[in-house]
Image (cartoon, helix red, strand yellow):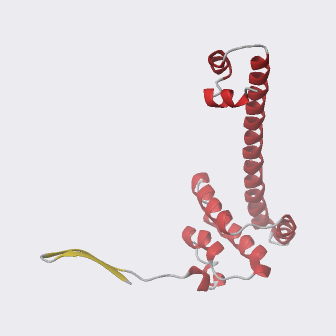
């Protein structure tokens, strides 16, 4: 494919590129490359449903082998997980397969799995706490309204937007 931007007197841009259809690429071809981009793109390459667990296992093996810093690992893991998510049953199968790996490699891969699961739980707990605090503020605001407090005072004390407080009025 190509793209050209030009005027009658000047060509400003002449760009030619190849289209890569990841879903048509065989994922197994790339698992031996020590390339972080190839690792992340495994999730978009050609695999069938039965191979999902194996694809994620190979991705984790690549990630462990690359020994990237935490920020780069998080970036690659986030991209991969966006396109290839396993069910709980598949995650159990993945763990079972990791246990059959050579001990040193299995330890690195399991450390990655546990690390990202823990981060996910922490993020979930943070969201839960935020929701709980917001609900508590709404409950306090409702009680304050019932006691006759005006919306400006409730806003000042709870931090809730005035629009939200107005919607709580009976």
**x, y percentage for residue 37?**
55, 69
Q: Quadrant of the N terminus?
A: bottom left
Mark count: 0
* Image vertical order of residue 46 relative to residue 142, above or below: below
Q: Does residue 47 show up?
A: yes
Closer to us: 151 or 130: 151
Closer to us: 113 or 17: 17
Closer to us: 142 or 30: 142
- The answer to whether residue 39 is left or right of residue 108 is left
Seen from this angle, which residue lies furthest left? 9
**x, y percentage for residue 68?**
59, 59
Q: Quadrant of the C terminus?
A: top right
- Residue 84 occupies which quadrant of the picture? bottom right
- Residue 130 occupies which quadrant of the picture? top right
- The answer to whether residue 30 is left or right of residue 86 is left
- The answer to whether residue 145 is left or right of residue 76 is right
* Image vertical order of residue 108 relative to residue 142, above or below: below
> Which residue is pictured at 54% across the width and 82% down the height?
21
**x, y percentage for residue 160?**
65, 27
> Which residue is pictured at 62% across the width and 75% down the height?
44
> Which residue is pictured at 77% across the width and 79% down the height?
49
> Which residue is pictured at 70% across the width and 82% down the height?
47
**x, y percentage for residue 6?**
21, 75
Q: Does residue 25 show up?
A: no
* Image vertical order of residue 47 relative to residue 149, above or below: below
């Amino acid at each position: 494919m190509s793209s050209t931007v030009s005027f009658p007197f000047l060509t400003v841009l002449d760009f030619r590129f190849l289209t890569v259809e990841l879903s048509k690429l065989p994922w197994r071809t790339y698992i031996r490359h020590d390339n972080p981009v190839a690792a992340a793109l495994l999730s978009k390459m050609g695999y069938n449903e039965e191979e999902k667990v194996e694809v994620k296992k190979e991705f984790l093996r690549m990630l462990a082998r690359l020994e990237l810093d935490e920020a780069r690992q998080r970036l690659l893991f986030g991209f991969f997980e966006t396109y290839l998510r396993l069910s709980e049953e598949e995650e159990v199968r993945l763990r079972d397969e990791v246990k059959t790996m050579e001990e040193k490699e299995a330890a690195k891969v399991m450390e990655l799995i546990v690390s990202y699961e823990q981060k996910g739980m922490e993020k979930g707990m943070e969201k839960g706490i935020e929701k709980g605090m917001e609900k508590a503020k709404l409950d306090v605001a409702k009680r304050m309204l019932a006691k006759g407090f005006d919306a400006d005072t409730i806003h000042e004390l709870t931090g809730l937007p005035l629009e939200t407080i107005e919607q709580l009025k009976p």
